[in-house]
Image (cartoon, helix red, strand yellow):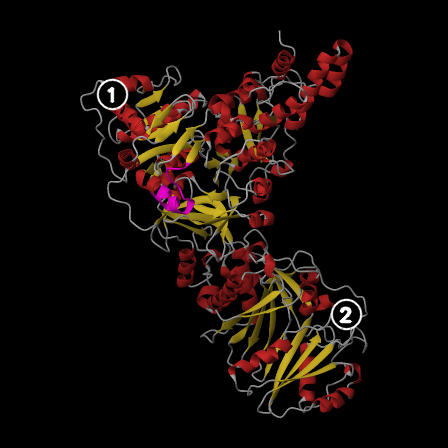
């Protein structure tokens, strides 16, 4: 990668962008006094500065050019003074390089060239070829803002670089128009959401031919901006025929406004002279192209490493040249090929980018026949008496865990669970749940976890979709489903104890399914992801060494078994010999209790969604209890690294390592990992790191084309984590699990948006489709919409995510809008949603509209949706809690002041007025807001109230009565 780097102090950067330079080789150079005499003949430039340097090199030495370049790239001073500097760089053989540096508003390129000719023996320049310095105190240009895709390193701001640009002579000539169009096309791939805008720097625009002799040409006169109409479905011919249209104001690139990301500078090549159109980039990427006599183009791509990464700058220049050559072929440009068919780079370059996102698997291939339960059995033989699982009421060693699971596996076999079948598991979080999951695997089956809090309709659908015939559930916990047998764990243990083949493990291998986890689906029903044993083993093998996982670690199982984060928590711990602490449901909802548990059990490995971790950070600041956590794994939703700064204050990185991981259920929990440092937290880094060993990531365009480094597109994931399929949905499987045309490997099209950095790490930028993440839960808005449309008398529906304007993720919520017929209400619709959807998918509000507003493209026009109204049976707006409280206070005194204060607390956290009859969760509340409310209630002087008690008293009237009873017990 041929390049050059030099530094310009930040305060000089803008001035350098306004200067240009010309270097001329002089075999018989004039002396300094002779140059001064010549300058005196041009009165307006007589105050130009003259310098002389001497080198110890011959003019033919390869290194000699750098001496002249040092002078050619050194800008003029920004303060008022000489606007021309001439340096004579003399070499040991008598030859010299004459270097002229001037402000473009004083000398145009032609004027600069004429002056150089005159100083080396040519004719006197024609009058009017130059102007004078602008008035003192004229404001300079503001700093450039780099494009998001540039990925420059802020610490390198002012470090300037160049990348070579070359378009060879071909069968078909390339002109300025094609080069500009090529730059616009390349730019459109880097930022598909913006209109391609290309700037043009004209070094001749400063020539004041029509101005008075001493008039100054404004800087913006040299800069033009052009927009290109771009749609990937339009033909190449239509794109070229349409051409660019002028965009005003033209001077944006040099005034600190929205920067024109890419600009062109055209000129004619001169073998005897080296011209630099700017001494710092005028545009974030400034592409200089000079036409040679043979029709080829040579030049330089100028960039600031603080705005544009060098690899991206080099690639951009190559891609413009490649696309220009392609467009020059009449067979390509004259047909009806769509713009999406224009190749951005050669196939080999695309393959290089794809390889950059691959991380080799750890040494030692997965042994044939390896299974999750087989690995556990190996650990039992090595460490039979080590503690495996505890839940607060019982503790199981690895021997006991394996023994109970073997008994239960026999019970499953006797109950009709045949090898290869799917077994449902619907249990509370405790040690028995972990035993049951292992038992299902030992029976040769795959487990299908279902949360006990899910609505019965959702449980029935999951069982039917997965083909479950046996469900392990507590008595009465699972709804009746035709053809499905529900058995309690105790019954399976009893059956297993009577079997003559006790302890037998069904033969399975690494390719067999280990589990099916259901996630939100766009069709209105959840979709099941089938994951084999080998994926789970690869996940643990790929992270164990880096994370230092082993028998000394104590993990928490914090998440529901129906959430794939639990796969990492359970098997990541047990497959490395660790001690798994199963956190009871109500403890996961009470931050104070959870923090106490972490301290008491000396937990070392903690897995959290960022939303759940933030209250824990606050609790940690208040609690005197010391934690032993050495590793925090973040996943489930994007992490704002800045939120970790308070954690670093109490837990230095040397003692506790935070790791940000990006992952998807279809790619086995985690895909990438990035250790978050305090420096990264200060920068607010969005990087989720490189692919895990055995995984691969790449970023693609809509047609699956490889996008360049820095460009945003869809994340494709390949390698060891790719799931087998969607259960019972072959069409969806075929659309999302595809063969990569570059590598020929099977990959998963994630629907997530990201960009790849030059080091192969990934930045996660959210979702492309209607899927969202709220507090770690993956939600398809279309599934909620379909459920709403299924409610009686609903003829239209839309669902949107409302993000808190202050960035508080605990306040994020789902708002629904419906069009109703006369015989129903929003309360009926809300109740219908609660019957079918898990709590985290139930809209916080349901608002009735006459019609769903649509854009011209037929999509929901979110901007035109009104503010949401709560889904509540009463038609009237709840009373103002303050006003209500004041009225009550006058009647009942201090007792009713408590009601007023509690209603105010609820109203503040829910962001809406709350009345005594309102329900906290129907008003948009969630588990994170519960914790905040209870902390504030405690500040009122009330005794501590458990989260479980809040859930049991979730209407305002019930909660007020509960607090009264705690303050004044009977």
Mark 1 residue crowding within 10 angstroms, few (<14) / some (14–19) / many (20+): many
* Most common SS among magenta residues: helix
957 shown above or below 543 = above
Frontmost residue, 766 versus 395: 395
Label 1 sits on residue: 496
Choose top left, top right, bottom left or bottom right for residue 512.
top left
| Residue found 53% across the figure and 75% down from its top | 298
| Residue found 38% across the figure and 19% down from its top | 478
Frontmost residue, 27 versus 784: 27
Q: Distance between the residues labelled 2 and 1?
A: 90 Å
Identify the disc placed on residue 590.
none
Label 2 sits on residue: 79
| One can see residue 527 in this view | no
Disc 2 secondary structure class: loop
Asked whether the residues under the numbered discs 2 and 1 touch, taking CB atoms below 8 Å apart as contact, a structural biologist would say no
Choose top left, top right, bottom left or bottom right for residue 223.
bottom right
Choose top left, top right, bottom left or bottom right for residue 184.
bottom right
Based on the picture, tell me whether residue 470 belongs to the magenta stretch: no
Residue 317 percent coordinates (x, y): 52, 66
332 shown above or below 667 = below
In this picture, which residue range is highlighted in magenta?
538-553
Disc 1 secondary structure class: helix
Give the side of residue 790 with respect to residue 737, left or right. right
Give the side of residue 282 with respect to residue 375, left or right. right
């Amino acid at each position: 990668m041929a390049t050059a780097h030099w530094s310009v102090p930040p305060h000089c950067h803008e001035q350098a962008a306004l200067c240009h330079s010309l270097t001329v080789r002089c075999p018989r150079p004039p002396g300094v006094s002779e140059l001064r005499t010549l300058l005196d003949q041009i009165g307006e430039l007589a105050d130009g500065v003259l310098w002389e340097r001497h080198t110890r090199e011959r003019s033919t030495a390869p290194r000699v050019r750098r001496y002249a370049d040092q002078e050619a790239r050194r800008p003029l001073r920004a303060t008022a003074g000489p606007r021309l500097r001439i340096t004579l760089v003399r070499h040991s053989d008598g030859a010299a390089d004459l270097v002229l540096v001037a402000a473009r508003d004083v000398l145009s390129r032609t004027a600069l060239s004429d002056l150089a000719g005159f100083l080396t023996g040519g004719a006197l320049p024609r009058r009017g070829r130059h102007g004078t310095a602008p008035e003192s105190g004229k404001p300079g240009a503001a700093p450039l803002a780099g494009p998001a895709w540039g990925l420059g390193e802020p610490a390198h701001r002012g470090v300037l670089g160049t990348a070579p640009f070359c378009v060879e002579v071909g069968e078909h000539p390339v002109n300025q128009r094609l080069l500009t169009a090529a730059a616009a096309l390349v730019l459109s791939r880097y930022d598909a959401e913006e209109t391609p805008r290309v700037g043009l720097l004209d070094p001749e625009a400063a020539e004041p031919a029509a101005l008075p002799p001493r008039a100054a040409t404004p800087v913006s006169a040299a800069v033009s901006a052009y927009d290109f109409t771009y749609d990937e479905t339009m033909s190449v011919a239509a794109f070229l025929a349409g051409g660019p249209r002028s965009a005003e104001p033209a001077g944006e690139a040099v005034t600190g406004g929205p920067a024109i990301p890419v600009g062109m500078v055209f000129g004619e090549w001169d073998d005897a002279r080296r011209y630099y159109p700017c001494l710092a980039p005028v545009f974030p990427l400034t592409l200089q192209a000079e036409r040679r006599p043979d029709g080829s183009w040579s030049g330089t791509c100028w960039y600031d490493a603080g705005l544009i990464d060098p690899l991206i700058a080099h690639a951009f220049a190559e891609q413009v040249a490649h696309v220009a050559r392609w467009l020059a072929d009449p067979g390509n440009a004259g047909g009806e090929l769509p713009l999406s068919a224009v190749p951005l780079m050669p196939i080999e370059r695309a393959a290089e980018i794809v390889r950059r996102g691959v991380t080799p698997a750890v040494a030692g291939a997965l042994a044939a026949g390896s299974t999750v339960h087989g690995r556990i059995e190996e650990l039992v033989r090595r460490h039979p008496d080590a503690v495996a699982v505890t839940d607060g009421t019982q503790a199981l060693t690895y021997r006991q865990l394996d023994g109970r699971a073997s008994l239960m596996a026999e019970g499953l076999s006797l109950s009709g669970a045949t090898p290869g079948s799917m077994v449902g598991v619907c249990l509370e979080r405790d040690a028995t749940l972990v035993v049951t999951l292992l038992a299902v695997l030992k029976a040769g089956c795959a487990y299908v976890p279902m949360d006990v809090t899910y609505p019965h309709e959702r449980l029935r659908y999951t069982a039917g979709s997965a083909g479950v015939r046996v469900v392990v559930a507590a008595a009465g916990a699972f709804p009746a489903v035709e053809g499905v047998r529900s058995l309690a764990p105790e019954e399976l243990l009893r059956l297993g104890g009577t079997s003559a083949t006790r302890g037998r493990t069904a033969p399975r291998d690494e390719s067999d399914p280990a589990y099916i986890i259901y996630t939100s689906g766009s069709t209105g029903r959840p979709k099941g992801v089938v994951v084999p044993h080998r994926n789970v083993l690869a996940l643990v093998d790929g992270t164990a060494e880096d994370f230092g996982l082993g028998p000394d670690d104590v993990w928490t199982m914090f998440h529901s078994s129906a959430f794939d984060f639990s796969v990492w928590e359970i098997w990541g711990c047990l497959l490395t010999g660790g001690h798994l602490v199963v956190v009871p449901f109500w403890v996961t909802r009470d931050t104070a209790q959870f923090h106490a548990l972490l301290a008491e059990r000396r937990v070392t490995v903690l897995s959290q969604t960022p939303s759940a971790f933030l209250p824990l950070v606050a609790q940690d600041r208040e609690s005197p209890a010391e934690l032993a956590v050495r590793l925090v794994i973040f996943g489930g939703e994007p992490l704002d690294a800045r939120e970790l700064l308070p954690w670093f204050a109490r837990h230095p990185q040397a003692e506790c390592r935070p790791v940000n991981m990006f992952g998807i259920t279809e790619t086995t929990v985690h895909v990438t990992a990035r250790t978050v440092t305090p420096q990264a937290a200060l920068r607010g880094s969005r990087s989720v790191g490189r692919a895990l060993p055995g995984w691969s990531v790449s970023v693609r365009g809509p047609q699956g084309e490889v996008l360049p480094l820095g460009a945003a597109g869809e994340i494709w994931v390949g390698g060891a984590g790719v799931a087998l399929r969607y259960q019972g949905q072959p069409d969806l499987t075929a659309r999302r699990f595809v063969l990569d045309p570059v590598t020929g490997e099977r990959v998963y099209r994630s629907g997530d948006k990201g960009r790849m950095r030059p080091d192969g790490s990934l930045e996660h930028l959210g979702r492309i489709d209607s899927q969202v993440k709220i507090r770690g839960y993956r939600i398809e808005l279309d599934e909620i919409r379909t459920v709403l449309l299924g409610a009686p008398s609903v003829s239209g529906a839309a669902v949107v995510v409302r993000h808190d304007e202050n960035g508080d993720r605990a306040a994020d919520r789902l708002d629904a809008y419906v069009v109703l017929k006369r015989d129903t209400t929003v309360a009926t619709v809300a109740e219908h949603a609660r019957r079918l959807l898990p709590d985290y998918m139930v809209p916080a509000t349901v608002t009735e509209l006459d019609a769903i507003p649509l854009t011209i493209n037929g999509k929901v026009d979110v901007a035109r949706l009104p503010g949401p109204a709560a889904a509540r049976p009463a038609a009237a707006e709840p009373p103002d809690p303050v006003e209500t409280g004041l009225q009550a206070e006058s009647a009942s005194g201090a007792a009713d002041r408590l009601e007023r204060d509690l209603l105010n607390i609820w109203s503040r956290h829910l962001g809406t007025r709350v009345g005594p009859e309102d329900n906290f969760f129907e008003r948009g509340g969630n588990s994170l807001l519960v914790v905040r409310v209870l902390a504030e209630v405690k500040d009122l002087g009330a005794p501590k109230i458990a989260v479980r008690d809040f859930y049991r008293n979730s209407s305002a009237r019930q909660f007020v009565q509960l607090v009264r009873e705690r303050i004044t017990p009977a």
